[in-house]
Amino acid sequence: MFFELRKYQMDALQFAYRQRRVAMWLPMGLGKTLTTLATIDADPSMLPALLVGPKRVVEHVWSAELAKWGFQQSIAIVSGSPAKKRKAIAAGADITCISADSLKYAIGGPWRTIILDEATLFKNPKSARWKAAKQLAEADNIITLTGSPTSGAGLADLWGQIDLLFPGGTNPLGTYWQFLQRHFSFDHFNRPHPRRGAEERVAEIIRPWVFQRTLDEIAMPGITTVDVACPMTAAQQTAMSESELSESGAFVEQRQIASGFRYDQHWSGTVDTEWIAETKVAAMHEIRLETGKDSLLVLCNFRAEVDRLRDEFNAEVIDGRTSGKSDGETITRWNRGEIPMLVGNCAAMSHGLNLQSGGHRVIWFSLPVSQEIYDQAVARLWRSGQENAVIVHRLIANDSIDQKIAKLLDRKMLSQAALLQAVGC
C-alpha cells in the first residue's frame, strides 16, 4: 500500500464498518475514493462490490485510483455493447464499475456492497436509474458518496438518496409523500419549500447514517474568485430586449446572448450559430495573455461556446461528444502539463476527474444554474494534491442574466451549508 489514511478517513472507514449502510457527505478534495477503497479493502466480506457513477468516473477514475494507491482487488469496467457489458459483469471481478445509466445490467448480480458515486444522480425517486438502484437495496452494505447532497432542489433532494440506504419501507424519513407533508409547504405552483427548522429536524433523523466532514479537516490550497466584467454590446442589448423571460426557452436564450451568440433556426430545420458579440472571447484573449504559460481549464454550458473556443485557441476539448478513450488520453496529457487550454462542457467535467496536477486556473465562460455542477467543476482543480492557489475567473456580462445566475448560485450555497452544518457532529 502506498498511502496513510488521515484521521477523518479512518473515522469514515470505522463508521461504514459499524453502520454498513451509510451516506458519506465529504466535500470534493477529501478523498472519498481512497476512503471507500480502503473500507472495502479492510473487510473482504464486502466483496464483490458494485460501483455505480457517472460514465467518465467509472471508466477512468476508480481503476486509476486502485492502481495509484496499490490496492490488489481486481476490477472490471462495464461499457460498450450490451454483450460486452454482460461479459464484464460475468467476469467475477472484486469491484465492478458501471455507469448509472447502464445499471439495469447489474440487477440480480452477486453484490455484497453497492457504492453510489455520485449519490445526487439518484435524488429523483421517479427516475429509471433510481428505480434500478432501489432493486439493489437488499445488499449487505451500501455506501453513497457526495459532496453536495442538497445542491439542486435543496432539502427535497434528500429523500431519494436516503431511501436507497434502506430496504423497502424502513426509511426513517417515511414515504416520499410523508416526507414532503411533514417538512415542506407548497406554493401555488405546487413546488415544495422547507418549513422553518426542517433542515435541523431532518438532520437529526438521518444523523445515525450520515458521515460528514468539512474542508477544515485538511490543508486545502487557497482559492480566489475573480469576476471579469464584460460590457454588453448594442446588438446584445437589442437581442435581450426581444427575449422575454416569460416565454418558453427565453431563460436559456438570454444566457446564450450574454455569452455573445444566439441560435438561428431556418425554415428547413437547420440551426446556425450567430455570434453577435465578441466581448467574452476578447476577455479570454486578455486572460490568455496575462496568465502566460499557465494551463487554463475553461468551462462552458453550450456547445457553441465549446466549438468557438476550440477553434479560436486551438484548444483541447472534453464534452459529451468525445469518447471515453479519447478523454482518458486528454486527461493524462493535461496532468503532464502538455495542454495549454482545455475546454469542456461543465456538466461533462463536473464529477470525478482529477485534474489538479495540470493547472490551477479555472475560467467560467458561462455560469451553470446548478450549485452542484459549479462546485464539482471547480473541484477538478481545487482539491487535495493541488500545489498552487486556485484562481477562478468568471466572465460576467454587465446588466445581464449572468449576474442573476451568480446570485442564484449564492442562495443555493447558503441553503446547502445550513443542512451540512446541522448534520455535522
Image (tube, rainbow, N blue to C red):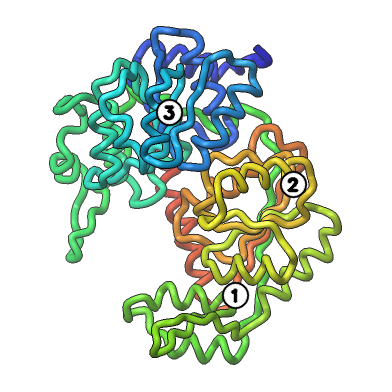
Compared with 112, 363 (above or below) is below
Q: Name which quarter of the figure residue 232 lies in.
A: bottom right
Residue in the foreground of this view, choosing between 80 and 386: 80
Q: Mark 2 is on which residue type?
A: Gly
Q: Is residue 49 left or right of residue 393?
A: left
Q: Secondary structure at mark 3?
A: helix
Instruction: Name the residue beneath numbered marker 1.
Output: 397
What is the x, y in percent for residue 191?
A: 23, 58
16 and 191: which one is in front? 16
For marks 2 and 3, give the CA distance.
35 Å
Cβ–Cβ under 8 Å for marks 3 and 1: no
Identify the residue position indicated by label 3 in the image. Answer: 88
Quarter of the image that includes the N terminus:
top right
Three-letter code, disc 1: Ala
Which of the two labelled residues, at mark 2 and mark 3, occupies the earlier sequence position?
A: 3
Pointer 2: what residue? 359
Left-right relation of 34 to 164: right
Residue 79 falls in image quadrant: top left
* Residue drawn at x 67%, y 43% as measured from the top left: 329
Residue type at tag 3: Ala
Mark nearer the N terminus (3 vs 1):
3
* SS category of the residue bearing label 1: strand
- Quarter of the figure with residue 134: top left
Which one is nearer the viewer's eye here, 264 or 186?
Answer: 264
Q: Is residue 47 above or below residue 277?
A: above
Tell me the residue at 56%/49% (across/down): 377
